[in-house]
Image (spheres, helix red, strand yellow):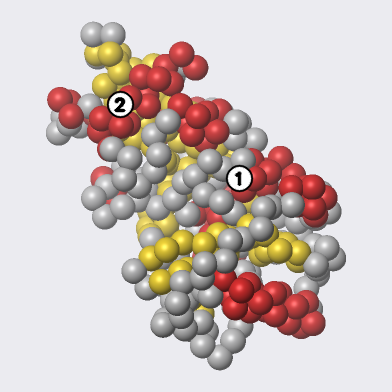
């Protein structure tokens, strides 16, 4: 069996293996989706390692590039995402071999750390390979009425011109560890994403709110994936944001609203808001080349991530 980096011409074979091994229940498996996620990412093309046996792709392991900013320094990170092993080769340790080999490659290429939110089946395997538990992602929940009937109103089409004009004004000045956010990233992540339809609201001066709707067993969820400040938000600015959220909730007849409340994150207001709860998936981190920055990265209070950074896509 050989191990080698993936090439563009391998994409059809990779997608076929993903479909065979995982199905399409959680995420779509298509060449277009793979290209958007692993090739067109503005942080750079993903690290993808293949296991080849008798000329066939029997295993794939992908780390998606991500860049965070901390104390003025850009941290080169990776997010452990897609992996699959052919059914005939499962139970032979191929997932571990692929992951360890790609870990070695990532370390040699100078990446600082890897992060991901593994499921209950794989998390113990990650721990054995040096991943450390960072903790459950804290979620802020606001109930808007569990018995509200589903809205039949269709959301208007996204004003692409306004969105691009707004994100061009963003100046990231987070005190915490936040993603390297620019026009290219936001356009790729939310306008061009083939998986979900994202909506946005802005007053053009204070905030940019990016969200999507999701039907769950509890009703319609309004998931706030980004709350980006266009300028320093004071109490008046927070009031404007909460008024806009309330307007959307009423218009769409949302049952509940969620967002992430990281150390420096925006909190939903309102009488029916719960305090941030550690009910999200478990975030894990694997140190590669952090050195003296390790202590700061593993301090939860330093982080300013969004739900858009960590949701499955």
> What residue do we see at 35% from left, 47% from top?
26
Please tell me whether mark 2 sits on a helix, a strand or a loop: helix
Q: Is residue 257 among the parts visible in the rendering?
A: no
Q: Is residue 170 among the parts visible in the rendering?
A: yes
Q: Is residue 87 left or right of residue 282?
A: left
Which of the labelled discs sits on residue 17, or is there none? 2
Quarter location, residue 308: bottom right
Q: Nearer the viewer, residue 255 or 33?
A: 255
Q: Earlier in the sequence, mark 2 or mark 1?
A: 2
- Residue 152 horizontal/vertical position (percent): 52, 67
Q: Nearer the viewer, residue 200 or 80?
A: 200
Q: Nearer the viewer, residue 180 or 105?
A: 180
Q: In the image as oriented, which residue stretches furthest toward the bottom? A: 271
Q: Is residue 244 left or right of residue 225?
A: right
Q: Is residue 163 left or right of residue 97?
A: right
- Residue 54 horizontal/vertical position (percent): 23, 8
Residue 117 vertical position relative to residue 289 in the rendered view, above or below:
below
Which of the labelled discs sits on residue 189, or is there none? 1
> What residue do we see at 28% from left, 8% from top?
55
> What residue do we see at 40% from left, 39% from top?
28
- Residue 298 horizontal/vertical position (percent): 50, 58
Q: Quadrant of the N terminus?
A: top left
Q: Is residue 55 left or right of residue 117?
A: left
Q: In the image as oriented, which residue stretches furthest toward the front? A: 152
Category of crowding for the residue at label 2, using alpha-carbon neighbours closer than 10 angstroms: few (below 14), some (14–19), many (at least 20): many
Residues at marks 2 and 1 touching, judged by CB atoms closer than 8 Å: no
Residue 119 vertical position relative to residue 247 in the rendered view, above or below:
above
- Residue 229 horizontal/vertical position (percent): 75, 64
> What residue do we see at 46% from left, 13% from top?
9
Distance, label 2 to label 1, CA atoms, is: 25 Å
């Amino acid at each position: 069996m050989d191990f080698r980096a993936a090439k563009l011409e391998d994409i059809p074979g990779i997608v076929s293996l993903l479909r065979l091994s995982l199905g399409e229940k959680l995420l779509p498996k298509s060449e277009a989706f793979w290209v958007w996620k692993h090739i067109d990412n503005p942080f750079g093309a993903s690290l993808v390692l293949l296991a080849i046996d008798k000329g066939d792709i029997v295993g794939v392991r992908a780390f998606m590039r991500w860049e965070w900013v901390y104390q003025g320094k850009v941290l080169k990170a990776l997010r452990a995402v897609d992996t699959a092993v052919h059914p005939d080769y499962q139970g032979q340790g191929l997932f571990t071999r692929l992951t360890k080999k790609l870990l070695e490659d990532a370390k040699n290429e100078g990446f600082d750390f890897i992060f991901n939110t593994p499921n209950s089946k794989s998390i113990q395997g990650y721990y054995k390979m040096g991943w450390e538990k960072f903790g459950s992602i804290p979620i802020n929940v606001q109930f808007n009425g569990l018995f509200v009937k589903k809205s039949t109103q269709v959301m208007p089409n996204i004003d692409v011109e306004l969105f691009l004009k707004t994100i061009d004004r963003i100046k990231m000045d987070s005190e915490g560890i936040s993603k390297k956010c620019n026009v290219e990233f936001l356009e790729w992540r939310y306008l061009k994403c083939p998986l979900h339809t994202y909506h946005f609201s802005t007053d053009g001066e204070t905030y940019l709110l990016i969200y999507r709707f999701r039907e769950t067993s509890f009703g319609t969820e309004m998931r706030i994936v980004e709350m980006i400040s266009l300028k320093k938000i004071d109490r008046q600015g927070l009031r404007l944001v909460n008024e806009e959220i309330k307007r959307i909730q009423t218009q769409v007849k949302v049952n509940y609203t969620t967002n992430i409340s990281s150390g420096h994150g925006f909190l939903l207001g309102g009488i029916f808001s719960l305090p941030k709860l550690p009910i999200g998936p478990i975030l894990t981190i694997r140190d590669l080349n952090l050195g003296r920055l390790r202590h700061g990265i593993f301090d939860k209070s330093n982080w300013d991530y969004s739900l858009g950074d960590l949701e499955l896509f």
